Image: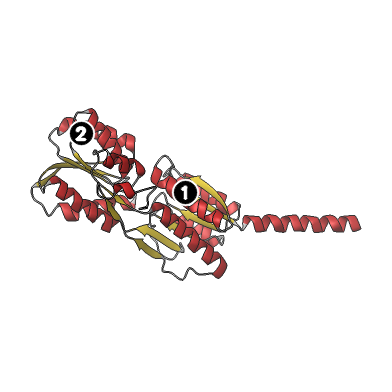
Amino acid sequence: MRKLTLLAVALCVCLYSSMAFAAKLIVVITPSHDNPFFKSEAVGASEKAQELGYEALTLVHDDDVNKQSELFDTAIARGAAAIILDNAGADATVAAVERAKAAGIPTFLIDREINKNGVAISQIVSNNYQGAKLGGEEFVMLMGEMGNYVELVGKESDTNAGIRSQGYHDVIDQYSDLKMVARQSANWSQTEGYEKMESIIQAHPDIKGVICGNDTMAMGAMAALKAAGKGDVIVVGFDGSNDVRDSILAGDIKATVLQPAYRVAQMAVEQADKYIKEGSTGLPEKQLMDCVLINSDNAAKLETFAIK
């Protein structure tokens, strides 16, 4: 009997230890790490989580809402203390965040908002409209306020793609001598940016500039332009990646707009930690971080989505 009692106590201790360990887990879910922006988010969040004493589990949804839903199920099954999420769709993500909330797991959104308030604890995003206006103003200046140009936009289902495009056009459309001859989605992809740019060059060989919704598309566009002997075409991106920094320093891409991905991800974990411990972040749900224009003047100071 005594042996059975001791065994029961040991099992209870193991179960309690397992539950305590699970409660210290922070799950970080982002799009593919093939994009350095999203990799920076994952690294920033996981490093901060570990610094604060949590286990960090980083997962990738590849912008697939079904896969994202499965990853939420994984986080719920693991008894996560919190989820840090760069989501796969502003509408499609709401149900998954609600499911986590019902399970007692708070979600902290970074980079992309969802189309419902009061479900996530925090939605910390870059001020995409403010940043796009900065990029648009720089583009207009580089273009000399005239000439034919192309716009490469991001994934159509991503709220940020529309916000950035709107910010660009609220600036550029004021100049009647700037004419957009093509506008295509390259789905945030460098490969698609290259392919779309190849086709556009054939149809519009006289383009003077290309404005892009993110840096990976800008890198693809620049590569296609150089391959076609048009390396002098003005290209502007958005994100503030090291790849575009190096391109700017080499005299190829002319500018980008930095959104502080690494710091935003760390802020989300800090707020998750406070919420877990105190039941509140003490901050509003919607939080905007201003963006910074990066060009040849300050590109050398850029490192991993932050100004050093």
Q: Which mark is residue 247?
A: none
- Residue 34 at x, y = what percent? 42, 39
- Tell me which corner region of the image, top left, top right, bottom left or bottom right, holds residue 20: bottom right
Q: CA distance from mark 2 to mark 1?
A: 33 Å
Report the quarter where the N terminus lies.
bottom right
Dot 2: what SS?
A: loop
Residue at label 1? 42
**Label 2 is placed on what type of residue?**
Gly
Which color mode does the image show?
Answer: secondary structure
Q: Earlier in the sequence, mark 2 or mark 1?
A: 1
Q: Residue at point 46% right, 57% down?
A: 266
298 up-or-down from 286: above or below? above
- Tell me if 90 is positioned left or right of 203 in this view: right
Is there any visible trace of residue 276 in the rendered image?
yes
Q: Nearer the viewer, residue 112 or 77?
A: 112
Q: Nearer the viewer, residue 303 or 122?
A: 303
Q: Nearer the viewer, mark 2 or mark 1?
A: 2
Q: Which mark is residue 231?
A: 2
- Residue 157 at x, y = what percent? 34, 48
**Label 1 is placed on what type of residue?**
Ala
Q: Identify the residue at the far right of this view.
A: 1
- Tell me which corner region of the image, top left, top right, bottom left or bottom right, holds residue 234: top left
Dot 1: what SS?
A: helix
Is there any visible trace of residue 108 in the rendered image?
no
27 up-or-down from 152: above or below? below
